[in-house]
Image: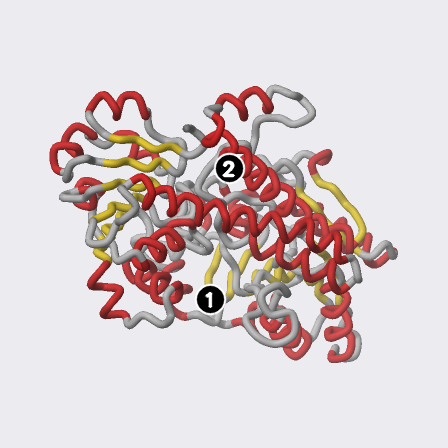
């Protein structure tokens, strides 16, 4: 594989950055039409466009050696042997399948661009999370528009990365999944990609399957992980009503080797770019295949997640004497989880929108999410509210201590480690009394805070 050049179109970055790091003999070019994003990847001070622990160190070592970032998409396509297509596939907002189906417009545009530009044979690798059999439409487009003597082989190579641990996941993956057509040409292309990963991934961790199985496996994995979260969150409601402790229940259940302890942490709800989108995609796929019972089953996972958010915000109001009008609430955390700046489907957005509707004032602090992203997310969540109205109710703070100043309540919406290290005694002295804490992430020591004087409400505890 010494002569291979890899191009990744419109990428998230970490995967190809790690490929470049682990394969110094392979030229990796990441191309994107967004000039500002490419400039950030190339910035002298390494202010990268995404936050991911360990990513900066990887880029520092490989950039300029065999890792390059460019807006010259056509040049990247022309020079590449392997092309990773990693574009957004958001849920459709209008038209057929709106609210459920994946919008494959960017996938098709990228595919057509490859067919238009390529003059030599390419292996095209589908990295985006897509509905089952999307590769078939990609192959049809490529073959219908290919130049004489130019052959395309399509592979599916979904990413199984968790934001916040993506680099360590890439260094030591549970598995690398490669799907291909079970033809001599497809199997040969599959081996070419497997040879890239073989530079650092043990052979038994590289799984080769059929093309359609690979596509469906990504949706299935995310759906089943989200299902576990919704299941433990459903049990948290029962715990609150009966006096059981969700931590103890999850600990006991997780000891069963058939179940295991992972993804059994109750919370205010899951978020991120994948779980909800992929489950809704699975719902739409099931309905398209005339499997209404299957569709209803998976839809309930999302409905339970939305219920958990609503239930938590209602508990805040109920606990604070059935009104939060005019009261100031500090929301600690805006990212959907710790160790990422990603806010997509973040529970904090829903909570803050609910607090706004109750005419509360909200202070927000998050250590990684840019302020303009917070404003954009809040505006999208309340499209009928003028920006000026939102900004009268919401203030973005530069520290947790500032956010808690003169507040009646603190809501922990993201499990950032630094929230454990807050001087809670000082926070208490600076808050209005009674001072409430609502822990939506099972993060803080409730008994310790109660001794300080806080009234503490925790997910999954009475």
Q: Where is 54 relative to 387, above or below?
A: above
Nearest the eye: 445 or 396: 445
Residue 295: percent from left, percent from top: 71, 55
**Residue displayed at 25% across by 36% down:** 436
Numbered label attached to residue 168: 2
The answer to which quarter of the image holds residue 420 is top left
| Classed neighbour count for the residue bearing mark 2: other residues with Cα under 10 Å, few (<14), some (14–19), many (≥20) | some
Determine the secondary structure under disc 2: helix
Say if 92 sits above or below 209 in the image. below
**Camera-side residue of 70 and 342:** 342
Q: How many marks?
A: 2
Tell me what residue is drawn at x 36 percent, y 43 percent: 413
Instruction: From the viewer's perspective, tell me whether residue 189 is left or right of residue 63.
Output: right
Front residue of 418/326: it is: 326
In the rendered image, residue 406, in percent from the top left (x then y), is placed at: 14, 44
Quadrant in the rendering for residue 182: bottom right
Closer to the camera in the image, 219 or 141 = 219
Q: Nearer the viewer, mark 1 or mark 2?
A: 2
Element on which disc 1 rests: strand
Taking the image as drawn, is residue 47 in sight? no
Residue found at the very far right of the displayed protein: 183
Could you tell me which residue is drawn at 56 percent across and 31 percent down? 262
Q: Which residue is mark 1?
A: 70
Rendering coords of residue 45 (x, y %): 29, 53
Horizontally, residue 264 falls left or right of residue 436, namely: right
């Amino acid at each position: 594989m010494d002569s291979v050049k890899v191009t990744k179109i419109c990428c998230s970055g970490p995967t190809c950055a790690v490929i470049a790091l682990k394969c110094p003999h392979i030229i990796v070019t990441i191309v994107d039409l967004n000039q500002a994003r490419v400039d950030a990847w190339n910035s002298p001070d390494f202010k990268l466009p995404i936050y991911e622990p360990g990513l900066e160190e990887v880029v520092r070592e490989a950039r300029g050696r065999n890792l390059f970032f460019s807006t010259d998409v056509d040049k990247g396509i022309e020079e590449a042997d392997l092309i990773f297509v990693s574009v957004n596939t958001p849920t459709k907002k209008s038209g057929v399948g709106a609210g459920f189906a994946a919008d494959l417009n960017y996938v098709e545009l990228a595919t057509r661009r490859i067919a238009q530009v390529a003059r030599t044979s390419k292996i095209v690798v589908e990295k985006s999370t897509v509905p089952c059999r999307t590769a078939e439409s990609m192959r049809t487009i490529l073959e219908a528009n290919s130049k004489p003597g130019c052959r395309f082989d399509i592979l599916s190579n979904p990413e199984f990365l968790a934001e916040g641990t993506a680099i360590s996941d890439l260094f030591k993956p549970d598995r690398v999944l490669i799907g291909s057509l079970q033809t001599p040409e497809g199997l040969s292309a599959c081996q070419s990609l497997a040879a890239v990963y073989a530079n650092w991934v043990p052979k038994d961790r590289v799984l080769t399957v059929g093309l359609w199985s690979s596509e469906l496996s990504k949706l299935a994995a995310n759906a089943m992980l989200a299902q576990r979260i919704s299941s433990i969150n459903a049990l948290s409601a029962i715990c609150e009503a009966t006096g059981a402790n969700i931590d103890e229940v999850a600990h006991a259940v997780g000891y069963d080797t058939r179940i295991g302890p992972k993804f059994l942490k109750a919370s205010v709800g899951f978020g991120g770019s994948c779980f909800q989108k992929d489950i809704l995609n699975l719902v739409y796929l099931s309905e398209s295949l005339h499997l209404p019972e299957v569709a209803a089953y998976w839809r309930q996972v999302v409905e339970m997640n939305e219920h958990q958010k609503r239930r938590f915000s209602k508990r805040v109001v109920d606990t604070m004497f059935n009104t939060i009008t005019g009261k100031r609430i500090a929301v600690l955390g805006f990212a959907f989880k710790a160790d990422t700046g990603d806010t997509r489907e973040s529970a904090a957005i829903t909570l803050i929108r609910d607090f706004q509707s109750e005419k509360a004032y909200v202070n927000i602090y998050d250590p990684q999410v840019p302020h303009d992203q917070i404003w954009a997310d809040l505006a999208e969540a309340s499209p009928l509210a003028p920006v000026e109205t939102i900004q009268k109710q919401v203030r973005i703070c530069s520290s947790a201590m500032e956010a808690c100043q003169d507040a009646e309540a603190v809501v922990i919406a993201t499990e950032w480690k630094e929230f454990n290290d807050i001087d809670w005694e000082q926070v208490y002295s600076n808050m209005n009394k009674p001072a409430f804490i609502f822990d939506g992430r099972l993060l803080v020591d409730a008994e310790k805070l109660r001794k300080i004087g806080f009234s503490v409400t925790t997910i999954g505890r009475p």
